[in-house]
Image (cartoon, rainbow, N blue to C red):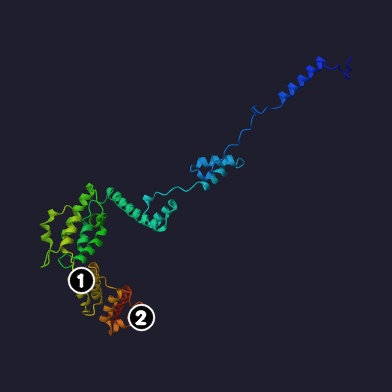
Amino acid sequence: MPPVAEGRLQGDPEQVNEEQSCAEEAQAASPTPNSEVEQPAPPPKQVNITELHSLPDIVSALGQRLPEVDDEKLAKLAELLQPPKQIDITSLDSLRAITSALKHRLPEVDDQTIAKIAEVQQNANSIASKRVRLAQAKGRSDISEDLAMVKEHTTPLNRENWFQWRQELRLNMVMVSYADELLFGEDEIEYTPFLEELDRKLVATIYLTLDADGPVAVRYQYLKRRHECSNGRELLKLLESELKPGGHWKQVWTLYKLYKVSLVNDDIDKAIEKIDRWAYDAWNLGVPVPEAHKCAMLLKLTIGKEPYRVAWTQLQSEKACNDWIAVSSALRWANEFERTSYR
C-alpha cells in the first residue's frame, strides 16, 4: 500500500482542480506579449509662436503655455511678439526708406545690389505717383493772373538767349500747378479734360513769351507753325531743336562773352548777373566754369578799388575767396554800403 501524504492523498482530484484554477488565474492576470496595453495620451504639441502672424493665434498659443496669466497681460505680450507688418515698398518716396525695407525683406542680398534695386524702385514709385497726381488733377479754372505773371517775369525768347529763357520759364511756371509735369516732364501723360484745358493755356502763354520785336524775333515764325505741335511739351521740344545753341564754336563764343564782362559805372550787381548768365550757358553747353574762375573774374574787376578792398580782406581771413556765393554777396554788400554812406 503506497504512503499517504500529509493532509491529502496523492492524486486527489480536488487538489488537481484547485491547482489548475490557480494557474489559469495567474495566466489571466499576467500580460502576454501580444496583448494590447492602453497607453497614456501624448501631451498636445506646442506651436512655434515665432511662426504665427495673426494676433488672435498668438494670444491662443500663449494661453496654452501660460494658463496662469490673465487675458489682459496675454494680449499685451502678444502685441510685443507679433512680427512687424511688411511695408508696401511701392508707397515709399525716400531712397533711404526703400533701401531699409528691401534689406529687411532680402537679408541675404548684398548692399550694392540692394542699392541698385532701391534706385529702380524709387524711379518706378515716382512715375506712378506723378501719374496718380495728374489723373486726379483739379484746380482753379481761372489762372489768368498766374499766367500773366509768368509772361511778365520771363525774358522774351530770341535766337540768342535759349538757356536764360528756358530757365526763367520753368522757374516762373512753378506758380501754376501741374505746369512743370506737362511741359518739362518725360513720362507719358493721359490728358484729362482739365489737363487739356490747362495745356492750351500754357501753350498760349509760351507764345506770348517769344520775342516779337527786333532782328532775332521768333514769335510770328513759330505761330505760323503751331499746327506742328499738339501740346506744350511738343512746342518746347520744337523750340529747343531749333534755338538751343550747340557746337564747339558756341562753346568758345560763350566763354568769350563770359571773360569779356566788365564793370560799368561801378554796377557790381550787373557784372555778377552777366557772369552768372554766361557761366550758366557754358555749363549747358558742356563747359562748366569752376567757382574759383568766376571769383577770379570779380577780383580782376574790383581789385584796387576802395569799396571792395575790405570785403576781399575779410574773404581772405575766412578762407572764402573761392566761394562764389560768399564772394558775390560780400562785394554786393560793400557796394551797397559805399553808396548809402554818402547819401
Residue that mark 1 sits on? 251
Whole-percent x, y for residue 169 in the image = 22, 62
- Residue 150's place in the image compared with 39, above or below, is below
User: Is label 2 or label 1 in front?
Assistant: 1
- Residue extending furthest front? 1
Judge the density around disc 2: few (<14), some (14-19), many (≥20) Cα neighbours within 10 Å: few
Say which quarter of the image contains residue 339: bottom left
Q: For numbered disc 2, what is the local secondary structure?
A: helix
Q: Quadrant of the C terminus?
A: bottom left
Q: Position of residue 69 (x, y in %)?
A: 60, 42
User: What type is the residue that disc 1 sits on?
Assistant: Gln
Q: Is residue 59 left or right of residue 30?
A: left
* Amino acid type indicated by mark 2: Gln
Which residue position holds label 2?
316
- Quadrant containing the N terminus in the rendered view: top right
The structure residue drawn at horizontal position 19% and vertical position 73%, both measured from the top left corner, is: 252
